[in-house]
Structure formats: C-alpha cells, structure tokens
Amino acid sequence: MRSLLRLRLVLLATPLIALPAVGLTGAPAARAADDDDGGDAVVEPEDYDDEAPDEDYVWEDGDEQEDGTTTDGFYRLRTRSGFTWVEGHWDGGTWVAPHWQAAAVPAGQVWVPGHRGPDGYWVDGHFRPVAREGYTWVDAAMTDGVWVNGYWRPVALRAGEVWVPGHVGPGGVWVAGHWRESAKAGHVWVPGHWRYGAWVPGHWRPTVEKPGQVWVAGYWGPRGWVAGFWRPAARPGHYWVASRWVNGAWTVGRWAAGARPVVARRYRVHPVASMVRAHDRRLWHAGKRQERRGKAQQRRGEVMQGVGEATGNKRLEKKGERVERRGERKERRGERKQKRAR
C-alpha cells in the first residue's frame, strides 16, 4: 500500500513574510511563496500584509497523522543561532514533531518545546531551570481550543491580585511574569498574545475612547508597571513607530520625524496548508532494511576495489565499482520507500 501525499488548504489567514524591502536576503523564498497564489487571481488590498517584521522566514507544511489529527503549516525563521531545524518525521514508527534542535543542553535546564502561534508563525522553544524556588512549572496545554503556554506559577497567592504568566522573549530569554490588580476602575485587561512569533504583552485599556486620540498600551518593565497613555492620532511632520522588542527589551512606541518609510515590496497573504502524510509502517520498515542492505553492498564493493587496486587485478577492481553502484541504487530505493511511508 502506498502512502498518501497531498496538499490541502485549510485556512486562508496567515500572512507571509518578513524580508527587508532593500537588500533582500531571502527574496527567493518570498518569490516562491508569492508564485503559489493562483496566477491571475484578483488581488484585493486585504490580500497583503504590510506589518510583517523585517525578518527572513521560510514555510513549513503541516501534517496529518494516521488517526486523522492535523497540524497546520507555519512560518519560521530561516536560521536560529545555536540551533538546527528538524522537520517533522517518522523515526522507527514514532512521529517526531518539527522543532529546533539545540547544539548543547545547559546543565540543570529543561527544554520547553516551541509551537505554532495562532497567527501561523512559529514560537521558539526555550530552556528553563529544572526548579525555581517559590514557583511551580505549569506545562503548556490546549484549553478551550486555545494554546496556553507553559509558565512559572507562584506557590503563594495574593489577595486582590492576579498573576500574569511570563513568556519566552527574543533569543529564547525568559521574561518573568508579574502580579497585577484584579480590577482597575475605568479599564479592562487585554491579555497578551503572540504576533509573528513574538509576544505582545497584556495591558490595561480604558473603557472610554477619546476622539482624535490613540491609546498606547502600558507594560511591565524591569522597575515595575509602566503606565499607558493617550497620544494624538496624527502629528504634522512625524510618523508613529509602534511598540516593539528592541535588543531583547519591550520598547514603547514613539514619534519619529519625517515621512514613514515606503516599503518597496509587499507580500501576499499565504494560505495555511496541511501536508497529509499517511504512514505505512510495513513500507517504512522495508525501505529501512533495503537502505541498510544497500550500504552493506557499497562497503563490499569498496573492499573489492581496494583489493583489486592493491593486487593490480583490474577485473576485480571494475567488479567492485559495479557492486558499489548497485548498492548505491539499492540505498536510494530504500530511502524513497521510507519517504513514501511518511
């Protein structure tokens, strides 16, 4: 039985990209993704995403398991210092989910796996201490259809306050959680969320809007809570730079002089895809055995060539070359069988 391999579009929502408008380092990947949009389809303004960060992303297909469970595709950064990307695959009949593989594991640390963010961008995994005094680690879990990240929870509670869990920040550094008031007059708490693989902190937002004004959210900084504030919707001769992560720290938005830079290239919204892979274990094991036999045959051919060369037996040397080539072909056939079974 051959395995099934097909592409299914399951959600039209995830924006592609994050490449510099000038000096594009990953332009081929962006162009390849843009070419998948259906050719002469009608292009609407909402088909584009102009807010993507200045990063280099690649697309990873989703998967469907034998039990029908599916995972959507996602974008991830092309490279991560100190890590190697491992695609989802079968290993001896066991499914290994896609992940970043660390080059080394620090002593006394535990790896927390990454996951696909709700907007279709990969959230990097990170290391955490095995234990932390005064805290209990709560594992990540799917709650009411929403992925809740793992976090440290204080053992002791505080009256009238709510714990805001910490999260992983840029570069895999843990950003500690904090306490907040359970309620604040005239405000509502807006939970934090993932955007382009980075965490946008939760904040208090006024319940009453101000005409001509835009609310700039507050945040928890190294010295405690930094209050939000209202700003004019526009300022002559300036443009607003949104709050963002800068060198590992959350930086509040600001006004910048001049006109907003024009992005020379815009990127199409890419559909989230699931790559359906039905796993045939019998075929996979047969392919593995054939691959091993091919490698053994290659080694025999190499030995024959060595003996023929050492003794001046050209006939034996030629025969060894033929045996080695047959072993290579057998190994490739075994590898193809394993791929069909994934």
Image (cartoon, rainbow, N blue to C red):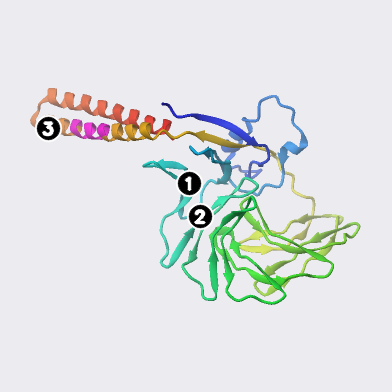
Dominant secondary structure of the residues highlighted in magenta in the image: helix
User: Marks 1/3: CA distance?
Assistant: 45 Å
Q: Earlier in the sequence, mark 1 or mark 2?
A: 1
User: Marks 2/3: CA distance?
Assistant: 50 Å
Q: Which mark is residue 320?
A: none
Q: Position of residue 198 (x, y in %)?
A: 62, 55
Provide the residue designation for mark 2.
113
Provide the residue designation for mark 3.
307
User: Marks 1/2: CA distance?
Assistant: 10 Å
Provide the residue designation for mark 1.
97
Residue at 64 percent of width and 60 percent of height: 246
Q: In which quarter of the view is residue 69 placed? A: top right
Q: Earlier in the sequence, mark 1 or mark 3?
A: 1
Residue at 64 percent of width and 48 percent of height: 118
> Is residue 75 covered in magenta?
no
**Magenta region, residue range:** 293-301
Which quadrant of the rendered structure holds the C terminus? top left
Q: Secondary structure at mark 1?
A: loop
Q: Is residue 179 above or below residue 267?
A: below
Q: Residues within 10 Å of mark 1 (few under 14, many from 20)?
A: some
Image check: 323 left or right of 10? left
Q: Secondary structure at mark 3?
A: helix
Three-letter code for the amino acid on which mark 3 is drawn: Val
Observer-nearest of 50 and 292:
292
Can residue 25 be seen at all in this image of the molecule?
no
